[in-house]
Image (cartoon, rainbow, N blue to C red):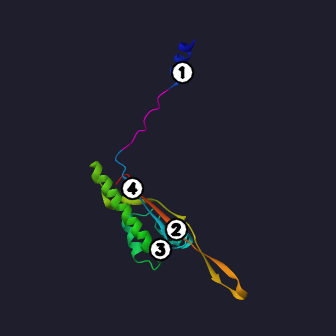
Amino acid sequence: MPAAKKAVAKKTVAKKAAPVRRGPATEARAFQRGTRQSPYKMRLVIDQIRGKDVNEALALLTFSKKHAAKQISKTLKSAVANAEQAARATGAALDVDSLYIKLAIINEGPKLKRFMPAAQGRATPIHKRTSHVEIVVSEREGR
């Protein structure tokens, strides 16, 4: 009887086919955690560069007056460097000019909670917000 159960178990187990990769799609990501600026202000800048080519986005960030542009620019340069490093490690050819920003998001980081003196001996809470920046760059297909 136990031998029959083993035979049935072997029949029900099926191997899954491996996913098919088409072409050398180079993709790299970079994170910056705990950036000392509120996510709302950072999202105003990141919305301008989402989906653009890397060179165009870097030019836009260079001439932006927003403080968030510096932090996002650093993260974007890191993502490009990570893509170059990954291509060098695998021996794949990578054209940096064909990279674009596939994903760019700002998440909320931990808040620094402080108190400020207020009228009549009270204390009012202050939340100093932080952000997490995530940027994924990928190579455009068909170029």
Q: CA distance from mark 1 to mark 3?
A: 57 Å
Which residue range is magenta in the image?
14-22
Dot 3 crowding, Cα within 10 Å, few <14, some 14–19, many 20+: many
* Residue 1 picture quarter: top right
Q: Type of residue at label 2?
A: Ser
Earlier along the polypeptide chain: callout 4 or callout 2? 4
Residue farthest to the right, as pictured: 120
77 or 32, which lies in front? 32
The residue that label 3 is drawn on is 68
The residue that label 1 is drawn on is 9
Earlier along the polypeptide chain: callout 1 or callout 3? 1
Residue 93 is left or right of residue 36, and the answer is left
Which residue appears at 68% of the width and 85% of the height? 118
Percent position (x, y) of residue 80?
A: 35, 61
Q: Check whether the beta carbons of the residues at disc 1 and disc 4 lie within 8 A of each other.
A: no
The residue that label 4 is drawn on is 28
Q: Check whether the beta carbons of the residues at disc 1 and disc 3 lie within 8 A of each other.
A: no
Q: Is residue 121 visible?
A: yes
- Which quadrant does the C terminus fall into? bottom left
Dot 4 crowding, Cα within 10 Å, few <14, some 14–19, many 20+: many
Residue farthest to the front, as pictured: 121
Q: Check whether the beta carbons of the residues at disc 3 and disc 2 lie within 8 A of each other.
A: no
Q: CA distance from mark 3 to mark 4?
A: 21 Å
Q: Is residue 93 visible?
A: no
Q: Check whether the beta carbons of the residues at disc 2 and disc 1 lie within 8 A of each other.
A: no
